[in-house]
Image (spheres, helix red, strand yellow):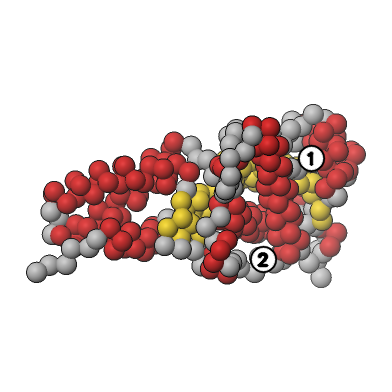
Amino acid sequence: MGFYPNRTHLVLIAWSLLELILPGCVAFDPAVQSKVEDLGERPYVAILLFGFDQEITKLSTVKTVAEVLLPEEEAAQLAAALSQIQQEARWLLVSRLAAGQGFWIAPLAEADALAEELQLKPGVLPNAEQLAEFRRRLGVDLVITSTILDYGKIRWQWLVAGMLTDMTAETIALGLATSWNPIGLGANIGLELLTNTPLWFGGGYLFGVAMRPVRVEARAFETINGYPIWQTMEQSVYAWSALKTFPEEVRDKKEIQLELNLAEIMESIGDSLTKQELLTSRLRGQPAVAQH
């Protein structure tokens, strides 16, 4: 008699396949170190506050909510939570770049004050005039602006792609176990559409694995001519091993899971920028001084 896996077996098999298929698994590695030895060649950079690409209107989108809140209470807590996410994302990026030792970082308060004065909202791309003002007022060579594309709430394109990947993994596992029985395969697809749509639309936590897709896009602009010189989009799909370092009672909290994926993304973004080996002399159009 053949082995017919139950739902639990299938989910575990699927997660194993997804670990190989999906990019973006939380893994905290040492920061990439800059090869720019001359301290004078390390660019001076202003890192602006992160913006949100999608409007988030519910507190439950970004954190676990255990009680029913009045509209005023939820609005206040949501505003505080979103501000904390913005600040945390930037702090993680600043920390990663500082650990890589390839840049000088302008004071965040000064960057925020100037951005507000120039009416430059978080996540909005600066124009040449605004960049020139950052150079004149703060003396920075680079301005980095970033946008959180998905955080708890994900767009429908990710919903479709995620569900297709999930169903493909489970269909392969079920097909191998049942000799590709069409009735079993059809029933599994129907069950997937019924049960996994909520999972992929807002994330989920199952068997110690947190499926909380987060995506962030970042750009760097030089401040002389206002040209973009670097851009990246990073994503982290699920948290597993890093989640195990937290006490059991908090592992299922949405905010913990999202923060882990955000931290992984900031690692990747910071390392990506450090690897560019940007030099102050090149950004200013000057001949580089030979390093010793």
Residue on which the image places disc 2: 31
The three-letter amino acid code for the residue at tag 2 is Ala
- Whether residue 267 appears in this view of the structure is yes
Location of residue 232 in the rendering, given as x and y in whole percent from the top left corner: 59, 47
On screen, residue 111 versus residue 147, left or right, reads: right
The residue most toward the right is: 137
- In the image shown, does 50 or 212 lie closer to the viewer? 212
On screen, residue 95 versus residue 12, left or right, reads: right
Q: Quadrant of the C terminus?
A: bottom right
Distance of label 2 from label 1 (alpha carbons): 26 Å
On screen, residue 35 versus residue 3, left or right, reads: right
Residue at position x 74%, y 59% in the image: 95
Q: Is residue 203 above or below residue 292?
A: above
Crowd band around label 2 with a 10 angstrom C-alpha radius: few (<14), some (14–19), many (20+): some
Location of residue 280 in the rendering, given as x and y in whole percent from the top left corner: 80, 52
Question: Residue 223 — which label?
Answer: 1
- In the image shown, does 215 or 243 lie closer to the viewer? 243
Q: Is residue 202 above or below residue 172?
A: above
